[in-house]
Amino acid sequence: MSRKTGRRLFWAACLVLCLAGFLVSLLVGPVRTTPGDLLRFIQSPDRVQSAIFIDLRLSRAVLAFLVGAALALSGAILQGYFRNPMADPFVVGVSSGASLGAVVAASLGFEAAVFGFSGPGLLAFLSGLAIVSLVYALSLRRGGFKVETILLTGIAAGALASALTSFFLFMRSDSYDQAVFWLLGSFQLAEWGQVATIAPWVVLCLLASAWLARDMDLLALGDETAQALGCPVRRVRKVFLAMSALLAALAVAVSGIIGFVGLVVPHWVRILIGPGHRALFVSSALAGGTFLLYCDLLARNLLAAELPIGVITAAVGAPFFLYLLHKKR
Amino acid sequence: MSAAAGSGKNAQERALVLVALLFLAPALILWVPVLKGAQDLKDDIGRPFPLPARTPERIVSMAPNITEILFALGLGDRVAGVTRFCDYPPETRSLRRIGGLVDPNIEVIQSLDPDLVIAFRGNPLRLVDRIGKLGLPVFVLDIGEGLEALFPLIAKIGRVTRTEDRADDLAAELRSRLEAVDIAMLGIASRPKVFVLLYGQGLWTCGGESYVDDLIGRSGGTNVASSLPKKWALYKRERILKDDPDVIFILARSSEDFTAGRDWLLRTAGVASVAAVKSGRIYELDENAASRFGPRLLDILDRVAKLLHPERFGERP
């Protein structure tokens, strides 16, 4: 099978799975609904059903898809950026920084909503971006800019932020539900406001990364070579880092930390369709969104009470990842 | 001629206005309190709440104590959904469950199409907000630090369900029982030191901000953990030995739990040398009633007062 047909097959499968995922998301929930109910609702909407189908289930599915796309794209960018398959939004400290901001806001009782973000969501977003800027600035100071330095600085800053997060959560033992939300993620509170807040940015970053993908391909050859081949290395690196940080911070701000998507999905995609970055970025976003859509379906339907989605992403993602890795070898 | 016609017309108009005013005045007087009421009602997180015109028909209760008060107000048949912890009165067991306190299911609540959702401060506020965003009327209540706070709580639930009269009756009944204990405790000679154990994991007890602390004080005792500025607190073993409580109450779900708690306290906890253990004054309190900020706290108050001061209730000390 040629690479091109393989790619087409992959896209077709992803699209079918994605559409099916949305349909199932609409039909399945704690309140029993049949396809007949959905059809009748489409013909003559009533208030209660509209709230369940549109306000609760559809907004949640769309948000899960967008966050999955954002995380996977962020991971794909960072893996290319660091030329290191271990990279994901955690290593540059975005996720940990964002959860720290959220937990501090919650501890201070900063609950008001601004621009579709909750108070903690907004602070999560800002602190996620702040920690990446800090990591970047610290890495720059040592004369030249080295990828290893930013990677290690990021890991250290992330560990520090995680420690502070745990400290704040420990100080407020009554905020257990908050702790679980920010450390393991959930789409329980999804609403259209959040979708509207992050959708434009996810689309914009996807377009920009696809447009700059050729430069990312050149970076894979090494910075000097890329420079020699006419790629403005410094500028391209800055833009990519900013985009991946933005995507991850947005994702954490609306849904808490969801691990594994950013690390694993780009790998799956690379194994299945090859390393070209343009296809990799677009496919990672599509596959990441679809993956998280199904994970959220499991999270809200597996047990009577909702599971944190981070539990599902790791439990489902890891075995499948190992399987693909070994099959490849 | 034209002037006279004009003045006649004016007089007619004036008469009309007068008649209209006569009819309107009672309506206005009737309306003023209603309008004022609508502005006055606020929930316990300070959000204004439009007062419903009639008693809501499908009420969702998001906490066991709220469920109890709703039933005590005779609204049992209007309660559409309760939490999985709501088990009193027994009629609640056949009701639709909306989930727990921290994990209520929004979709289930929405499917019940409630015209009133009563939440409590222990529900995650973000979740309460999400329910509000669906357009459901959510009224949030807090629990108080003392038994007195029961009265505003009942009054607010009465107000928001438009059962003000029944709420007044219930409050009056509870008030008379509270005062009976207050009177019985006038001029008591001693205040036994009390330790309350929440049986479960370790030496959990009630601090000074808990309504249980107030309940013990009203029953003529002193809570040894009173100085802890918390509702619930993990107590230190050495401090119990030093405090040397005269009476220990164990909050237990069943008599087996109580026995297990007492055995644990005597054998494992290392506090067997305190006065309460020596004199055998270790008593059970129904956790189900004592842990809910509702009308049954008066039963607990009666029981604690009688156990601490039997001489005050015409029983042999």
Image: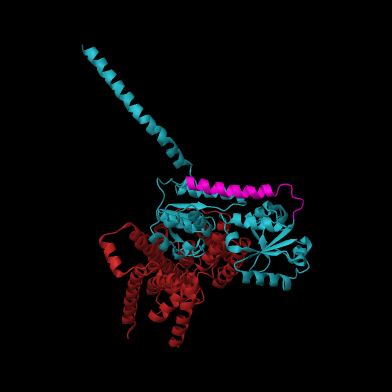
**How many marks do you count on the picture?**
0
Residue range in magenta is: B165-191
Residue B238 lies, in percent from the top left, at 76, 65
Instruction: Relative to B266, say whether B309 is above or below.
Output: above
Task: Let me know if residue A326 appears in the view.
Answer: yes
Residue A321 lies, in percent from the top left, at 46, 81
Looking at this view, name the residue that lies furthest to the left. B1
Q: Which residue is at the front of the view, A82 or A225?
A: A82
Magenta stretch, main secondary structure, is: helix
Residue B46 lies in the magenta stretch:
no
Q: Is residue B10 left or right of residue B250?
A: left
Q: Quadrant of residue B1?
A: top left
The colouring scheme, among rainbow, by chain, secondary structure or one colour, is by chain
Instruction: Relative to A46, say whether A295 is above or below.
Output: below
Residue A269 lies, in percent from the top left, at 41, 77
Residue found at x 31% / y 81%? A5
State the quadrant of the C terminus of chain B. bottom right
Q: Is residue B292 left or right of residue A205?
A: right
The chain drawn in red is A
Instruction: Relative to B36, say whether B108 is above or below.
Output: below
Residue found at x 71% / y 70%? B265
Q: Is residue A4 left or right of residue B247?
A: left
Q: Which residue is at the front of the view, A234 or A133?
A: A133
Residue found at x 39% / y 33%? B28
Task: Let me know if residue A259 appears in the view.
Answer: no
**What colour denotes chain B?**
cyan
Q: Which residue is at the front of the view, A97 or A302?
A: A302
Looking at this view, name the residue that lies furthest to the top. B1
Residue B180 lies in the magenta stretch:
yes
Residue A194 lies, in percent from the top left, at 42, 59
Q: Which residue is at the front of the view, B193 or A293?
A: B193
